[in-house]
Image (cartoon, rainbow, N blue to C red):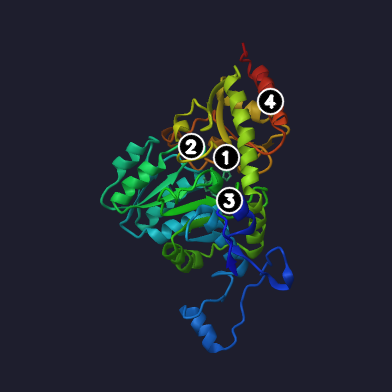
């Protein structure tokens, strides 16, 4: 196995970092659909368990198909290593439980993906971990929350669902000076648009269910980082919580990755047009999309991130009632959670992805009940806009707010 010399993301996405030669000349990676790996003798089995010999033992620990996916993801995120999981939450929970012990503190924002919030707010404290979540999505608020017990800063940017952007270089520099480990959720950007590890983040986590797989048919997660941290995550919490990805899902994800740069480029192209269209529509109250010049995080495009991604959050003038009426009228766009799929998906965060928040917690985190989240897909953009147009028109007529 020799190294592929290219650092071009299009080439890496297709060929991975190593030139592979598979059994029987197979072009596509084999799926090692096995739970156990046979040892030649007892000594070899013992050496595999002790780590004296590298090799495979049991599918909850490692698998060749999974290992190849991990090498590919590490090359895309430009980290030494990666660990693949059965879900994004598997990656996030195993990572945080590996890093944090009783008495340690983790600092983050109270606006987060709903289940990440639930893990931090409700479950980590059960292990004696102190969790500080700041309501204001601002670098200064996160910095002020840090104490001498802070071990980890957990950063999601852009944030789900409101699309607020945090300055990664500023926060990472701040944390490095205080030896605080930074964990960045890069789900909304993918490695095509943002590489937190290049900016100095210690660990980068993903819901691989989203852009990385891209086809709405796999639940998966990834953690990328330095060799020794990833090895610890794999040998402790991934193994003992049992959240490794299946070989078949690892293979589907590798197939998805081959078209990741192409898909993300088109996602962004479509999202920019949809966001611009929404922004000028008289029935719209607000549009949050980092690719719009009106977005406060727009200034970080070109340094931290190369584009605004493909998720848009918006509100209609007619508030919650009109938002519900609009979402009930879409045809081409599908009323479903998730994002980063080829299909355009629309959903209501307050009652769906963020229903893990109590009403007062939603308010504190700035997640309004009238917010609509749109994950722009790869259909013809004029069809997406036409569908939104007719749904907004119908909702406006129904809830009786004039566009004039
Ligand atoms: N991180 C972010 C930013 C996410 O948006 C999600 C899932 C996760 C982590 C967890 O990943 P999973 O375990 O689902 O693979 N976000 C979802 C969403 O916004 N709609 O449906 C799921």
**Residue 237 placement (x, y as % from top left):** 46, 64
Which disc, if any, is residue 292?
A: none
Q: Secondary structure at mark 3?
A: helix
Towards the viewer: 17 or 96: 17
What residue sits right under mark 1 in the picture?
352
Q: Which residue is mark 4?
A: 391
Disc ID at residue 302? 2
Please give the name of the residue rendered at 45% of the width and 51% of the height, measured from the top-left corner. Answer: 119
Residue bearing the label numbered 3: 9
Ligand 1 closer than 8 Å to the CB at disc 1?
yes
The reply to whether dot 2 and dot 1 touch (C-beta < 8 Å) is no
**What's the distance in space between the residues labelled 2 and 4, CA to CA?**
34 Å
Q: CA distance from mark 3 to mark 4?
A: 38 Å
Residue 72 point in image, percent of width and height: 57, 59
Q: Is residue 32 above or below residue 400?
A: below
Q: CA distance from mark 3 to mark 1?
A: 34 Å
Task: Tell me how far mark 1 sits from mark 4, CA to CA.
Answer: 20 Å
């Amino acid at each position: 196995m020799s190294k592929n010399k290219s650092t071009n993301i299009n080439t890496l996405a297709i060929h991975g970092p190593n030139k592979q030669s598979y059994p029987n000349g197979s072009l596509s990676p084999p799926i090692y659909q096995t739970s156990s790996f046979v040892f030649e003798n007892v000594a070899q089995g013992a050496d595999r368990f002790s780590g004296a010999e590298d090799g495979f033992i049991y599918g909850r620990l490692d698998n060749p198909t999974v290992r190849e996916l991990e090498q590919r993801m590490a090359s895309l995120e430009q980290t030494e290593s990666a660990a693949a999981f059965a879900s994004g939450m598997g990656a996030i929970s195993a990572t945080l439980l590996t890093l944090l012990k009783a008495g340690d503190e983790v600092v983050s924002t109270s606006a987060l993906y709903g289940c990440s919030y639930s893990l931090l707010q409700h479950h980590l404290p059960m292990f004696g971990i102190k969790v500080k979540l700041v309501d204001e999505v601002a670098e200064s608020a996160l910095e002020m929350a840090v104490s001498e017990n802070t071990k980890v800063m957990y950063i999601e940017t852009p944030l789900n669902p409101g699309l607020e952007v945090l300055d990664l270089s500023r926060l990472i520099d701040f944390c490095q000076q205080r030896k605080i480990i930074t964990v960045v959720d890069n789900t909304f950007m993918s490695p095509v648009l943002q590489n937190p590890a290049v900016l100095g983040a210690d660990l980068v986590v993903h819901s691989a269910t989203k852009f990385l797989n891209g086809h709405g048919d796999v639940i998966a997660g990834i953690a990328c980082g330095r060799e020794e941290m990833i090895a610890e995550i794999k040998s402790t919490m991934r193994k003992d919580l049992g959240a490794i990805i299946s070989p078949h899902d690892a293979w589907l994800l590798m197939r998805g990755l081959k078209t990741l740069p192409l898909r993300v480029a088109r996602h962004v192209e479509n999202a920019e047009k949809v966001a611009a269209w929404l922004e000028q529509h008289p029935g719209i109250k607000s549009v949050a999309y980092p690719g719009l010049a009106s977005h406060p995080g727009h200034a970080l495009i070109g340094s931290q991130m190369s584009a605004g991604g493909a998720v848009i959050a918006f509100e209609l003038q007619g508030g919650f009632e009109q938002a519900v009426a609009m979402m009930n009228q879409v045809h081409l766009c599908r009323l479903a959670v998730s994002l980063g799929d080829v299909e355009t998906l629309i959903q209501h965060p307050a009652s769906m992805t963020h229903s893990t928040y109590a009403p007062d917690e939603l308010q504190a985190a700035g997640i309004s009940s009238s917010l609509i989240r749109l994950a722009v897909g790869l259909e013809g953009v004029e069809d997406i806009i036409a569908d939104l147009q007719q749904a907004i028109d119908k909702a406006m007529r129904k809830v009786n707010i004039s566009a004039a």
